[in-house]
Image: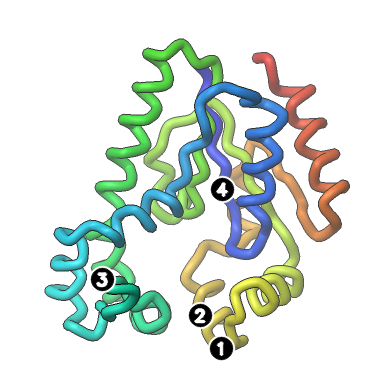
Amino acid sequence: MKSWIITGGIGCGKSSVCELMTKHLLAGAPTLFSADLEVQALFDKPEILAELCQAFGSEVVTHANGKDEVNRAWLREQVFSDSKKKSELEGILHPSVLKSLESERENQQKAGANLFLAEVPLHYEIGGTVSADLIIVVAASPEVQKRRLMERRGLDESIIEQMLRAQWPIEAKVERADVVIWNDGDRSALEAQVLTLARQHWPA
């Protein structure tokens, strides 16, 4: 079984690439593993909420929809303005995410899958600890990244700048990639690149 990692910068369109790759490469096979979705699932676990409260204080949790939830806007402001707090959050989340990734990879291999796809946004930031046969970086210009984050997430420019500084520069990720998908254009241009990648690298 081959393993491909999809990574890149925030606001570059990794999710769109994952949707297209799932459509064109997995078609009825096991679904793609998403580190972001795994983090969302962790935020729903009482033991993770307890760890976050211990690390960041009670403000990290808010009561909404009849249950305790992570105050994501507040937490985002904390971790992207303080590298120590960012490291604390990563220390809570990353081990569980990586454990789940390897468990899912093992399950898919046992099920006879030919290809394991995993979206790992911080692949390079965590030291490239996830092994893979192909590293695909989804990239875009800083101007496009900022515009997408403003339009789709409603973030202001100051927090966007902090988020971009907290990640590796997109140029550094591009230099280390096996394949680069440049996503400054529209959906059709993106899909054409995904199809080209599929023709060139699959089946391996």
The image quarter in which residue 57 lies = bottom left
What's the residue type where badge 4 is placed?
Answer: Thr
Residue 128, horizontal then vertical, whole percent: 43, 43
**Is the C-beta separation of discs 1 and 4 under 8 Å?**
no
What's the residue type where badge 2 is placed?
Answer: Gln
Residue 19, horizontal then vertical, whole percent: 65, 42
Earlier along the polypeptide chain: callout 1 or callout 4? 4
Tell me what residue is drawn at x 55 percent, y 31 percent: 4
Tell me what residue is drawn at x 47 percent, y 45 percent: 34
Earlier along the polypeptide chain: callout 4 or callout 3? 4
Earlier along the polypeptide chain: callout 2 or callout 4? 4
| Neighbour tally class for label 2: few under 14, some 14-19, many 20 plus, Cα within 10 Å | some
Q: Separation of disc 2 and disc 3 at Cα?
A: 30 Å
Residue 147, horizontal then vertical, whole percent: 72, 76
Residue topped by disc 2: 162
Q: Secondary structure at mark 1?
A: helix
Badge nearest the viewer, 4 or 3 = 3
Residue topped by disc 1: 158
What's the residue type where badge 1 is placed?
Answer: Ser
Tell me what residue is drawn at x 64 percent, y 36 percent: 178
**Is the C-beta separation of discs 2 and 3 under 8 Å?**
no
Q: Secondary structure at mark 3?
A: strand
Q: Separation of disc 2 and disc 1 at Cα?
A: 6 Å
| Neighbour tally class for label 3: few under 14, some 14-19, many 20 plus, Cα within 10 Å | few
Q: Is residue 194 visible?
A: yes
50 vs 103, left or right, is: left
Residue topped by disc 4: 7
Residue topped by disc 3: 67
Image quadrant holding the C terminus, namely top right
